Image (cartoon, rainbow, N blue to C red):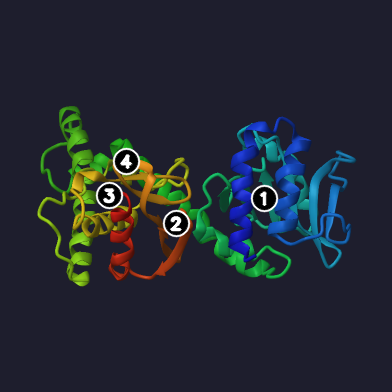
């Protein structure tokens, strides 16, 4: 199996079993050890590769243990601290990691509950673990853009320098996305004042602030909606499709603003909304537009007939660098077709129409 396929398989196991895991040891056995062995490729039973209960004296604290140390060349390279899967991770849980990081040669520290994997390094100060992770992997909703970075820590493809070099960008891009999403959902005074000052010449009084709070939020949502519709129009022109006039544009961008934040449970992107409109335009040659709906799941964006998950028209796998259009046959066996541009969906118009006609 390819690296991404192995990760997807373990993620499915985590989603199915997480609610049944009640102890830290069970978390290690069910999720953490399989991740280290199956995903990263290290032999958890070989002490030259993985040392459980790794011990090092840290100042006055003697005999403290880290759950796992992944070894390379006889030295610890990755430290892993585990917590029970039902609990949320907090930086306080990483206190032992923080101390060990300073007295070993490890450059990567991992805090995990088996569901969420937080990867830390020392961007802020040498040999001192950062208080914030540079990468967060959620096994309940795997961000496919992170897979190449995770793979660099595997035994087969270990490339520590590349991971460290990419860490700063990963850290700040993720933080910026979350901040942008937060501002779209609940604009701060600074955000409101910033935009108000560019369109309003008067003083920024309390009354003006109240007035522009709603206006800035409304303008942001309309902007995102218009961007989606502009991209849709461009794709339709490129594809040369005849779209019924009754096909509605995207009605709201609220979900787009919310889902810029990777911490939300379900992520709906602009590309997914545009892809949905293209599939809908194709399907509308056989059914009324209102019968074509969508549901976003953690692993894919589904286009359905009659809002019925037993009537899938297509699935959009757009979370990774490589996008896929999924089409299902009569036995519900899915075939994923790689696409580089959204207009390539039109090349599969026959398969989309066939799926629609199957339910007629």
* Mark 2 closeness class: few <14, some 14–19, many ≥20 residues within 10 Å: many
Q: Which residue was labeled with disc 1?
A: 129
Q: Mark 2 or 3, which is nearer the eye?
A: 3
Give the quadrant of residue 48.
Answer: bottom right
Q: Residue at x 69, y 33 (%)?
A: 21
* Mark 1 closeness class: few <14, some 14–19, many ≥20 residues within 10 Å: many
Q: Is residue 217 above or below residue 234?
A: above
Give the quadrant of residue 252.
Answer: top left
First in sequence: mark 4 vs mark 1: 1
Left or right: where does residue 201 sit relative to residue 84?
left
Indicate the position of residue 345 as horizontal and vertical percent values.
Answer: 31, 66
Give the quadrant of residue 354.
Answer: bottom left
Q: Residue at x 48, y 57 (%)?
A: 333
Indicate the position of residue 193 as horizontal and vertical percent values.
Answer: 24, 40
Q: Element under label 3? A: loop
Indicate the position of residue 206 as horizontal and vertical percent values.
Answer: 20, 28
């Amino acid at each position: 199996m390819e690296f991404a396929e192995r990760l997807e398989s373990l993620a499915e196991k985590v989603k199915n079993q997480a609610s049944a895991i009640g102890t830290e040891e069970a978390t290690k056995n069910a999720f953490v050890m399989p991740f280290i062995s199956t995903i990263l490729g290290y032999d958890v039973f070989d002490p030259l590769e993985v040392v459980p209960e790794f011990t090092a004296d840290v100042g006055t604290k003697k005999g403290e243990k880290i759950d796992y140390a992944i070894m390379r060349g006889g030295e610890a390279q990755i430290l892993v601290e585990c917590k029970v899967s039902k609990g949320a991770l907090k930086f306080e849980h990483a206190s032992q990691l923080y101390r060990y990081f300073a007295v070993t040669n490890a450059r990567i520290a991992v805090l995990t509950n088996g569901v969420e994997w937080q990867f830390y390094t020392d961007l802020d100060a040498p040999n001192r673990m950062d208080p914030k992770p540079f990468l967060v992997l959620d096994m309940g909703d795997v961000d496919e853009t992170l897979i190449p970075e995770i793979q660099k820590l595997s035994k087969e493809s270990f490339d520590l320098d590349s991971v460290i070099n990419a860490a700063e960008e990963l850290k700040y891009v993720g933080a910026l996305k979350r901040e942008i999403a937060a501002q779209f959902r609940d604009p701060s005074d600074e955000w409101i004042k910033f935009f108000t000052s560019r369109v309003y010449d008067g003083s920024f009084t309390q009354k003006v602030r109240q007035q522009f709070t709603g206006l800035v939020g409304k303008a942001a949502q309309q902007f995102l909606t218009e961007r989606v519709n502009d991209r849709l129009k461009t794709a339709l022109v490129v594809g040369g499709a005849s779209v019924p006039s009754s096909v509605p544009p995207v009605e709201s961008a609220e979900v787009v603003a919310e889902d810029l934040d990777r911490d939300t449970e379900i992520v709906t992107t602009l590309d997914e909304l545009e892809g949905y409109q293209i599939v809908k335009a194709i399907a509308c040659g056989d059914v009324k537009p209102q019968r074509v709906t969508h549901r976003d799941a953690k692993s894919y964006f589904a286009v359905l007939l009659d809002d019925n998950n037993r009537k899938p028209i297509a699935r959009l796998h757009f979370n990774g660098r490589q996008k896929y259009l999924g089409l299902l046959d009569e036995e519900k066996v899915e075939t994923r077709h790689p696409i580089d541009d959204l207009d390539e969906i039109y090349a599969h118009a026959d398969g989309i129409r066939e799926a629609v006609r199957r339910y007629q």
